[in-house]
Amino acid sequence: MASIPKGGTVAVTGSAGFIGGWVVRRLLDKGYRVRACVRDANNPERTDFLRAMPGFASGRLTIHAADLDDAGSFDDIFAGCHGVAHVAHVSSYTDHEYVRMVCDHLIESVNKSRTVSRVVVTSSIAAVISEADIQEYRRRPVFYEDRYPDETNPRRTPERQGYSMGKVIAQRAFADAAAESGDWDSVTCCPADNVGPIQSPHQKNMGPWQHNVEMMLLGEYYQNGAYRPWMTVDVRDDADCHIGLLESVHVRNGERYIAWSTDTPKVEEICASIDRLLPEVGHDTPAVTDNFPDRIKAREAEFRAIWAQCDLRNDRIKAVTDVEFRPFDESLRDCVESLLSVAKVKPKLREGFAHRV
Ligand SMILES: NC(=O)c1ccc[n+]([C@@H]2O[C@H](COP(=O)([O-])OP(=O)(O)OC[C@H]3O[C@@H](n4cnc5c(N)ncnc54)[C@H](OP(=O)(O)O)[C@@H]3O)[C@@H](O)[C@H]2O)c1
């Protein structure tokens, strides 16, 4: 059980994704050798951005096809690796037998490798705070690593809370397997709402937050999550959190760490900030609409007050890694610029402005 050696070899599941792609890039920046795992290595739309990374030309980055749904898929890839960043989504979060099966597939490949000493499992802030009853945030407003959603609430079912429950199942499955093995350890990273630059056009439609920024650019935006503010982390800082947890000598098997800056911008502020940060674009800031049913709308003031008294903490991840979280403005600016330049999004403009690309 150990942190990985600096400059060692790391496999990254979900490498074609928004977060996984940044974990790959930041690992290369820090001198690691990387095995990028994707489902279809021959799909240029999803993998060309990886091939364009300088480490690919030298061979420090290699690309591998593997599907979590297939047992044994990762055996050859993990053999010789020091670490694994398991960032990928799975095909279903509501079928918890399936979630356990997928964990077992990956765990078997880690065990067979005999070389992997640490796995970082990507969970979510949903595994910390996704409550079936919003009043639970009044009772327990401090959001930190020891907090779990109220698991006794009968409304916490796979149908309603499958994602949050599936992430907790994965965290525990890896920690238990690591303890049983004794050869490796498992640390969980719980990222919040990832905002920042996309690296490939296909990523525009993947994670929810960059898509939400795209909708703002296109002149349409709406409230989310019962008036919940965004609880953000820059995707590059999130990647650094994953790497910091692979490297850290201060973490223990089974622990989890929240990756967020603790910024909580409101949807309407974010929408207006695009023009504040990038006035040259001439973005025609849309009014934020509210698509909630009337019974939710009637409680807007109450819900906003509940979110406002929540207290987000990131002391623990800062204590075990050297990550500095950048301010949200930087994440939003770079997200917008990447949507314009990489994905060729054509924003809605005020009169007198023209699209540049
Ligand atoms: N985005 C956020 O704000 C956020 C917040 C909290 C937690 N997370 C967690 O962070 C992780 C990555 O999120 P993301 O936003 O980067 O997602 P993403 O852009 O949608 O990428 C997810 C990747 O998962 C891979 N994948 C899906 N099913 C797979 C399977 N059966 N086998 C192998 N790979 C599979 C896909 O690979 P291919 O492209 O190769 O098909 C995809 O590239 C997820 O675990 C998510 O729950 C994300």
Image (cartoon, rainbow, N blue to C red):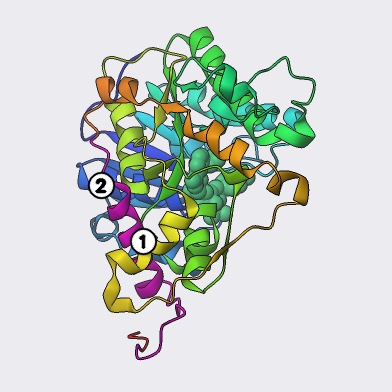
Q: Residues within 10 Å of mark 2 (few under 14, many from 20)?
A: many
Residue 314 horizontal/vertical position (percent): 35, 26
Please name the residue that numbered disc 1 is placed on: 273
Residue 10 horizontal/vertical position (percent): 35, 36
Q: Residues within 10 Å of mark 1 (few under 14, many from 20)?
A: some
Nearest the eye: 28 or 156: 156
Residue 339 horizontal/vertical position (percent): 41, 68
Nearest the eye: 131 or 63: 131
Mark carried by residue 28 = 2
Residue found 36% across the figure and 89% down from its top: 354
Q: Earlier in the sequence, mark 1 or mark 2?
A: 2
- The amino acid type found where label 2 is placed reads Leu
Residue found 48% across the figure and 38% down from its top: 76
Residue found 65% across the figure and 36% down from its top: 163
Asked if the magenta segment contains residue 328, the reply would be yes
| Quadrant placement of the N terminus | top left
Compared across the picture, whether 335 is left or right of 164 comes to left
- The amino acid type found where label 1 is placed reads Ser
Residue span colored magenta: 324-353
Q: What is the distance, in whole Å, between disc 1 and disc 2 at their CAs?
A: 32 Å
Answer above or below: position of 287 versus 63. Answer: below
Nearest the eye: 350 or 104: 350
Q: Secondary structure at mark 1?
A: helix
Residue found 36% across the figure and 61% down from its top: 273
